Image: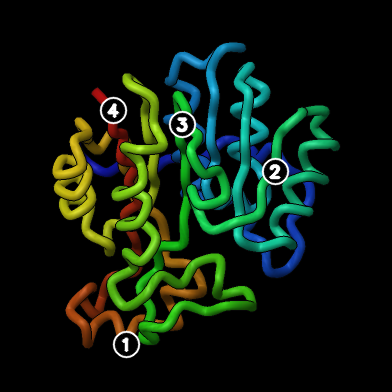
Amino acid sequence: MAAETWAPEPPVVTFAPSGVYAPQWDTGLLTRALRREHIGPATTVLDLGTGSGALAILASRLGARVTAVDISRRALVTGWVNARLAGQRIRFRHGDLVAAVPGRSYDLIVSNPPYVPSPDSRLPRRGRARAWDAGRDGRAFVDRICAAAPAALRPGGVLLLVHSGLCGPRATLDRLAQAGLHASVTDRITVPYGPVLRSRRRWLVEEGLVKGDENREELVVVRARHV
C-alpha cells in the first residue's frame, strides 16, 4: 500500500492543555480507521492512552460504550472535560494501559500510544515528553500493547494501533501474529516532521533511522483481529 498525503478531519475536542497530547495527523488517521468499524450500542471500546479523549469521544458518538485509560491524571481530566463538552458519557480509568482494567475484555481497542524514538532509553515520568517518547526504538508501548491485546480482546475483537514508520511496522505485524492475531497495515500517510523529530534529526541520522535529507515521516494504522 502506497503512502498518501491526506488531510485529517477536524478534531472533536476543544480542550488540550500543555502536557496533554492534542489531536494531530496520527489521531486523524486513526479516526478514519475507527469510522470503518461496525460500531453500535452493543460495542465495547477501550481507548488506551486517551490523551485529550478525541478517539474515545468519537467512538462514543458512534454509539459504543467506551472506557478510556491514561497514566496521566492531567490527561484524564482533559478527556473528562472534553467528553462533557461533547455531551458524551465515557468511563475514565487511571492506570498503565490494560492494567487499569484488569480482567476485562472489549470488542474494539484503539490506541495512539507514545512512539517517538528517543536518545534516552529511560521513559519520562513527567513533563510533555511523556506523551511521545518511547525509548530508543520507539516501541516501548507498542510492544506492550501487542502483547496485551489478545487477553483484552473478545473473540472477533479488533485492535487499531497507530504509530510511526520509524518504529518498524513489520515488527508490529510479526508480534501480533505471534500473539495469535491476524494483522495488517490498513492506512498509511506521509506527513512533515514535527518539532520533536526536527530537533532529533542528527541523532536519527546517526542511528540510521532516517536519511540526512528526509523531512517527512510515515504514519501507519495496524488493524489486528482476534480469531
Contact (CB < 8 A) between labels 3 and 2? no
* Residue 2 x, y percent position in the rendering: 21, 40
Contact (CB < 8 A) between labels 4 and 3? no
Residue drawn at x 46%, y 14% as measured from the top left: 38
Q: Is residue 136 visible?
A: yes
- In this view, 157 is above or below 162: above
Give me the C-alpha separation between circle 3 and circle 2: 16 Å
Q: Label 3, on which residue?
A: 105
Instruction: Using the rendered view, name the quadrant where residue 166 is placed.
Output: bottom left
Q: Earlier in the sequence, mark 4 or mark 3?
A: 3
Residue 225 is tagged as: 4
Q: Is residue 55 left or right of residue 187?
A: right
Q: Around disc 2, counting alpha carbons within 10 Å, would you say few (fewer than 14), some (14 to 19), or many (20 or more)?
A: many
Residue 202 is tagged as: 1
Dot 3: element: loop
Give me the C-alpha separation between circle 1 and circle 2: 39 Å
Q: Earlier in the sequence, mark 4 or mark 1?
A: 1
Dot 1: element: helix
Q: Around disc 3, counting alpha carbons within 10 Å, would you say few (fewer than 14), some (14 to 19), or many (20 or more)?
A: many
Contact (CB < 8 A) between labels 1 and 2? no
Q: Label 2, on which residue?
A: 92
* Residue 221 x, y percent position in the rendering: 34, 41
Q: Residue furthest front?
A: 103
Residue drawn at x 78%, y 51% as measured from the top left: 15
- In this view, 207 is above or below 218: below
Instruction: Using the rendered view, name the quadrant where residue 87 is placed.
Output: top right
Q: Amino acid at mark 4?
A: Arg
